[in-house]
């Protein structure tokens, strides 16, 4: 893939926050391109995964500062847009499922009203059409009784159903890019697989791009097309997902070695030994699609 066919281009992205002791760099020189594919973003807590997703959508709250040499979505310079133009992109062209999405739902509105509202905001539709589209989307995310869930409040649905409802809300405007920030982290394995199957089908059917943020290396290896491994706000390695377990960077190898195995011998898992050299600037070309 070349940059001519890239859906998203990120070059030299930095996110910083002021602190009493100076400036804290949460993201340091991240660069990658994304086509209509499933891109995994993995690393430990605090490695900069979630804040990278938020920075793309310009959702980093002040006093945080975002700067990039290039931040382009489908030919549009996101940094040059005013607030109104960015709101037109956010949600309609790029959607983001936050961590623990069920808790992002408004507790005093029914699930269906919130999904219908997302459709009406971006399509200027009437209530009847918005309700019909919301019911269709609930069915698309494999909720068996869309009518009942439409009229239910968030506390009346299970965790897995709440996750699906939130995914439906983010997808109903018909975005070209979905950023999913650990959408399955609070779910049991069976429901995890169901939610991933839904995302996989929708991405394939709609030709969307997906940035899938996760801690789970095995999950990302089985679900995504490519994987970016982040450490200390930088991308330290880029792998084809199917070859993730052949990664060479010592940080990636350390993460893989720390994973428990069913056929293990019962010994304590190894502790990741960190090297200050991992924080050195990486070659940005490594994160680009060949």
Image (cartoon, rainbow, N blue to C red):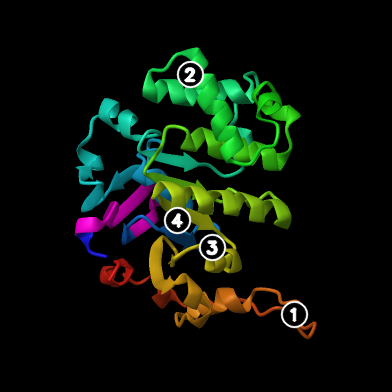
Q: Nearer the viewer, mark 2 or mark 1?
A: 2
Counting residues from the start of the chain, the first of labels 2 and 1 encountered is: 2
Q: How crowded is mark 1: few (under 14 residues within 10 Å), some or many (20 or more)?
A: few
Label of residue 48 in the image: 4
What residue does disc 2 label?
129
Boundaries of the magenta span: 4-28
Counting residues from the start of the chain, the first of labels 2 and 4 encountered is: 4
Query: Does dot 3 land on a helix, a strand or a loop?
Result: helix
Q: How crowded is mark 4: few (under 14 residues within 10 Å), some or many (20 or more)?
A: many
* Residue 285 coordinates in the image, percent (x, y): 26, 70
Report the Cα–Cα distance between label 2 and label 1: 57 Å
* Residue 199 coordinates in the image, percent (x, y): 53, 50
What residue does disc 3 label?
223
Q: Residues within 10 Å of mark 2 (few under 14, many from 20)?
A: some
Report the Cα–Cα distance between label 3 and label 4: 21 Å
Inspect the magenta stretch and tell me whether residue 14 lies in it.
yes
Counting residues from the start of the chain, the first of labels 1 and 3 encountered is: 3
Counting residues from the start of the chain, the first of labels 2 and 3 encountered is: 2
What residue does disc 1 label?
268
Quadrant where the N terminus is found in the figure: bottom left
């Amino acid at each position: 893939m070349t940059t001519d066919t890239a859906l998203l281009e990120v070059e030299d992205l930095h996110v910083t926050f002021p602190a009493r002791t100076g400036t804290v760099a949460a993201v340091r020189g991240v660069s990658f391109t994304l086509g209509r594919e499933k891109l995994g973003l993995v690393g430990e807590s605090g490695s900069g995964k979630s804040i990278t997703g938020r920075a793309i959508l310009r959702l980093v709250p002040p006093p945080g500062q975002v700067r990039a040499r290039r931040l382009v979505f489908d030919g549009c310079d996101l940094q040059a847009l005013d607030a109104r133009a960015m709101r037109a992109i956010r949600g309609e062209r790029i959607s983001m499922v936050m961590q623990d999405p069920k808790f992002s739902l408004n507790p005093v509105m029914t699930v269906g009203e919130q999904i219908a509202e997302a459709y009406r905001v971006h399509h200027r539709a009437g209530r009847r059409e918005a309700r019909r589209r919301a019911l269709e989307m609930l069915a698309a995310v494999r909720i068996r009784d869309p009518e009942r869930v439409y009229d239910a409040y968030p506390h009346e649905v299970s965790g897995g159903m709440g996750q699906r409802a939130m995914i439906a809300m983010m997808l109903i405007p018909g975005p070209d890019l979905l950023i999913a920030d650990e959408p399955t982290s609070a779910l049991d394995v069976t429901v995890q697989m169901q939610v991933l199957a839904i995302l996989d089908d929708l991405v394939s059917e709609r030709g969307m791009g997906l940035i899938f943020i996760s801690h789970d290396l095995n999950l990302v290896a089985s679900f995504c097309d490519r994987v970016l491994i982040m450490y200390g706000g930088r991308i330290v390695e880029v792998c084809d997902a199917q070859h993730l377990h052949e990664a060479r960077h010592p940080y990636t190898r350390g993460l893989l070695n720390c994973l428990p195995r069913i056929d293990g011998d019962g010994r304590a898992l190894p502790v990741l030994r960190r090297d200050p050299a991992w924080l050195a600037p990486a070659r940005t070309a490594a994160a680009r699609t060949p």
